[in-house]
């Protein structure tokens, strides 16, 4: 009986093992369940070249990712205009990325670096600038 229980636990842990660069090591919660949340910026890192601060360009940034595979982004731009972008998202590349396709047809490919219940780290390129965002639930 102990052997069967040990094997079952091992299978569950292996099934939930991370594929993301920065973890978590394992999770019994699906990638989709961990991704769907109302996310806010904890840290924005400019990966290449010179660029204005992400937080100056995208003030009060929120990224609401729904389990219905729809998303909404909210922010204020540098002109203090409130911007709302809506669209759909889907996992790609064996759930190592997700692509957000806005209603206007524009797409951004987000590489998932960390996906935990309370953290989402993504890397993406926007207007030639590569960013890494560390997000937390609102």
Image (cartoon, rainbow, N blue to C red):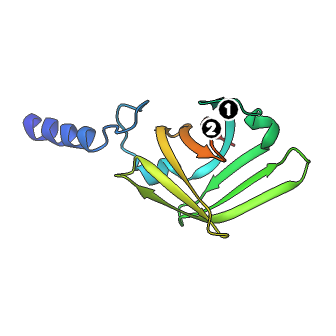
Question: Residue 106 location, x and y as percent?
Answer: 62, 63
For residue 5, above or below residue 93: above
Q: Residue at x 21, y 39 (%)?
A: 9
127 left or right, relative to 33 = right
Residue 61 position by quadrant: top right
Mark 2 and 1 residues: CB-CB less than 8 Å, in contact?
A: yes
Q: Residues within 10 Å of mark 1 (few under 14, many from 20)?
A: few
> Spatial distance from mark 2 to mark 1, Cα to Cα?
5 Å
Residue 72 bears which disc, if any?
none
Question: Residue 110 location, x and y as percent?
Answer: 52, 48
Q: Residue at x 79, y 41 (%)?
A: 57
Q: Depth check: give the residue in front, 13 or 104.
A: 104
Question: Residue 125 location, x and y as percent?
Answer: 59, 44
For residue 65, above or below residue 26: below
Q: Tell me the element at label 2.
A: strand
Q: Residue at x 10, y 34 (%)?
A: 2
Residue 20 position by quadrant: top left
Q: Depth check: give the residue in front, 50 or 115.
A: 50
* Sequence-earlier tag: 2 or 1: 1
> Which image quadrant: the C terminus?
top right
Question: Residue 69 location, x and y as percent?
Answer: 53, 64
> Which image quadrant: the N terminus?
top left
Residue 135 bears which disc, if any?
2
Q: Residues within 10 Å of mark 2 (few under 14, many from 20)?
A: many
Q: Depth check: give the residue in front, 6 or 130.
A: 130
8 left or right, relative to 95 = left
Residue 42 bears which disc, if any?
1
Q: Tell me the element at label 1.
A: strand
Q: Residue at x 68, y 64 (%)?
A: 86
Residue 28 position by quadrant: top left
Number of numbered markers: 2
């Amino acid at each position: 009986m102990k052997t069967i229980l040990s094997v079952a636990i091992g299978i569950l842990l292996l099934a939930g093992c991370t594929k993301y660069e920065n973890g978590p090591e394992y999770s019994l919660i699906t990638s989709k369940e961990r991704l769907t949340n109302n996310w806010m910026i904890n840290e924005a890192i400019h990966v290449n070249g010179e660029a204005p601060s992400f937080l100056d360009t995208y003030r009060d940034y929120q990224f609401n990712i729904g389990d219905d595979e729809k998303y909404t982004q909210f922010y204020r731009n540098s002109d203090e205009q409130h911007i709302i972008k809506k669209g759909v998202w889907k996992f790609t590349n064996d759930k190592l990325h997700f692509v957000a396709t806005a209603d206007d047809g524009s797409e951004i490919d987000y590489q998932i670096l960390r996906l935990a219940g309370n953290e989402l780290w993504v890397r993406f390129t926007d207007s030639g600038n590569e960013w890494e965002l560390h997000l937390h639930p609102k």
